[in-house]
Image (cartoon, grey):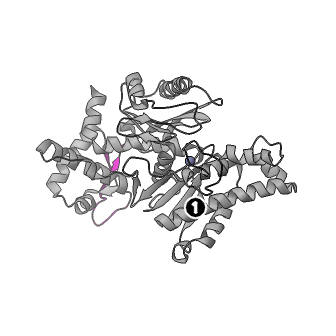
Amino acid sequence: MNTSLHALRGSNATLVKAQNLSSVLIAIHHLQPVSRTDLAAKLNLTAATLTNLVGELTSLGFVEETQSPHRQIGRRPRLLTLNPATAHFVGVEISRTRVQALYVDLGGTIHGRVTCPLPAQQPGRFVLQTTIDAVRAVTEGRPPIVGIGVGVPGPIDLERGMVLTPTNFGGWAHVPLTGLLQGEFGVPVFIDDDARTAALGEHALGAGQHVPNMLYVSLGKGIGSGLILNGSLYRGTHGLAGEIGHTVLDVRGPRCDCGNHGCLETLASIPAVLQRARDVGLSVDGIEQLLKAATGGNAAAATVLEDTRTYLSAALVSAVNFCDPDLIVVGGALVQAWPGLVPRLGASVRGHSFQQVSSDVQIVASATGEDAAALGAATLVQQHVLLRPDVVRGVTRS
Ligand SMILES: [Zn+2]
């Protein structure tokens, strides 16, 4: 959870109280189970102020108090924990191949999952209807939700909640996704680029937990990334940071939908790899077939895969030299189809980055796997709840 109190502004009493409530809730979320004494010290609050705030959060249902199993001098201390059942929400991934909806509680536990495959090149209205159907199906018979988070191929206009012009994505252009879904379900909707929500998911609940600086790279039909800097998602001035798929590796290479030539996505996305295989006379429908051919001694197949690894390695070395992360997490359909890819990328990147960086940087496969983008989208709603528990609970009760 990358929750920053800087998101709260204002100086009147109501906002200050809301900010204090949020501070206490976020601290309990991060430190749980935690004693009142430790919490007061951490937040620099008096015992009386903390008692009032914890009392309010308890009455709203967000916080529970339990007895510690460990006895200290005299008596067992009472510990505060988050009540995950207070709020539920849906995290959605809309990708070029499927829609996945997860029903998640405030603690990040998944209670329901609906996955709908998308046939190739469907019109936007079909993808939108599939998304609506998936959210309806995963929430059916369950407690009401307080919001929906969506990860979708970018670029995204975050201010207007609009999907702009994703490459290779069924003609989607300037789709006001936030407004459409809010109108349909009547709850707040938060959207972001799918690679960035995957980075959030991996950082909150996967391989990147407790790592301050992390780069998540998604390799599939498209190539994207999300950058966590000092524990928070970095979006850039226009919300467009992380478009690693449009790193130019060959200025005379294939033309990309973005307008440039030789972008990483035109060389190492799954469709690009399969196209290069067909260009050298191989008849393959998927990465698994290509791997099988290479393992069976087909030199052309081996070269296509080796070139792919070289392109990916070059882009990752540039990224490591540029942002010096502690960890790179690599996920997406290409990684799932090609299990040996990540260790080889790790060795290659460590061999070509600055020595001070390469001795430390870890490169691992995604731990949340196919759930990463939808789970991260759910954390967008979780962040909203933790920042304004008073508002969220008030709405839920009415
Ligand atoms: Zn491009």
Q: Amino acid at mark 1?
A: Leu
**Quarter holding the C terminus?**
top left
- Is-magenta flag for residue 78? yes
Q: On the image, which quarter does residue 120 sit in? A: top right
The span shown in magenta is 64-84
Give how far across and how far down residue 389 sits, in percent. 28, 40
The number of numbered badges drawn on the structure is 1
Q: Is residue 59 visible?
A: yes
Give how far across and how far down residue 173 sits, in percent. 49, 32
Q: Is residue 366 visible?
A: no
Give how far across and how far down residue 288 sits, in percent. 76, 47
Which of the pair 214/54 is nearer the observer? 214
Above or below, 285 against 31 in this view is above
- Is-magenta flag for residue 341? no
On the picture, is 280 further left or further right than 140? right
On the picture, is 43 further left or further right than 66? left
On the picture, is 22 further left or further right than 97? left
Name the residue at 55% across, 43% down.
371
Which of the pair 139/255 is nearer the observer? 255
Give how far across and how far down residue 192 sits, in percent. 44, 41
Which residue is the site of mark 1?
316
